[in-house]
Amino acid sequence: MARTKTKIAYSEAIAELESILQRLRSGALGVDELTTATKRAKELIDICRTQLTTTKQELDSIIDSTTL
């Protein structure tokens, strides 16, 4: 959980989320790490959601400004 809430690429956020999920599923996360991992997963989900929303808005704007 070395990363803080900084600007990271969508693909990096997804990869880190997948890593957290893998560790959860395999039982590799101990009780002491569970809260920290869950908080980080929430941050990553928020980052992805924001990036997806921004991208959708930008694409909608481009499509709306395109004349056929």
Image (cartoon, helix red, strand yellow):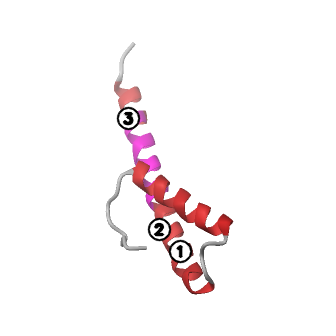
Q: Which residue is mark 2?
A: 43
Please give the name of the residue rendered at 61% of the width and 72% of the height, measured from the top-left corner. 28
CB atoms at circles 2 and 3 under 8 Å apart? no
Q: Nearer the viewer, mark 2 or mark 3?
A: 2
Please give the name of the residue rendered at 32% of the width and 66% of the height, measured from the top-left corner. 6
Whether 68 is drawn above or below 28: the answer is above
Identified by mark 2, the residue type is Glu
The magenta segment is 47-59
Quote the CA–CA distance across marks 1 and 3. 36 Å
Q: Which residue is mark 3?
A: 61
| Residue 15 percent across, percent down from the top left | 47, 54
Position of the C terminus, as image quadrant, is top left
23 to the left or right of 7? right
| Residue 11 percent across, percent down from the top left | 42, 48
Q: Earlier in the sequence, mark 1 or mark 2?
A: 1
Report crowding for label 2: few under 14, some 14 to 19, many 20 or more residues within 10 A (C-alpha).
some
Quote the CA–CA distance across marks 1 and 2. 10 Å
CB atoms at circles 1 and 2 under 8 Å apart? no
Identified by mark 3, the residue type is Ser
**Quadrant of the rendered image containing residue 2:** bottom left
Q: Nearer the viewer, mark 1 or mark 2?
A: 1
Magenta span dominant secondary structure: helix
Q: Which residue is mark 1?
A: 37
Quote the CA–CA distance across marks 2 and 3. 27 Å
Q: Provide the secondary structure element on which disc 1 rests.
A: helix
| Residue 65 percent across, percent down from the top left | 35, 26
Q: Earlier in the sequence, mark 1 or mark 3?
A: 1
Q: Provide the secondary structure element on which disc 2 rests.
A: helix
Q: How many marks?
A: 3
Q: Provide the secondary structure element on which disc 3 rests.
A: helix
**Quadrant of the rendered image containing residue 5:** bottom left
The answer to which of 14 and 23 lies nearer the viewer is: 23
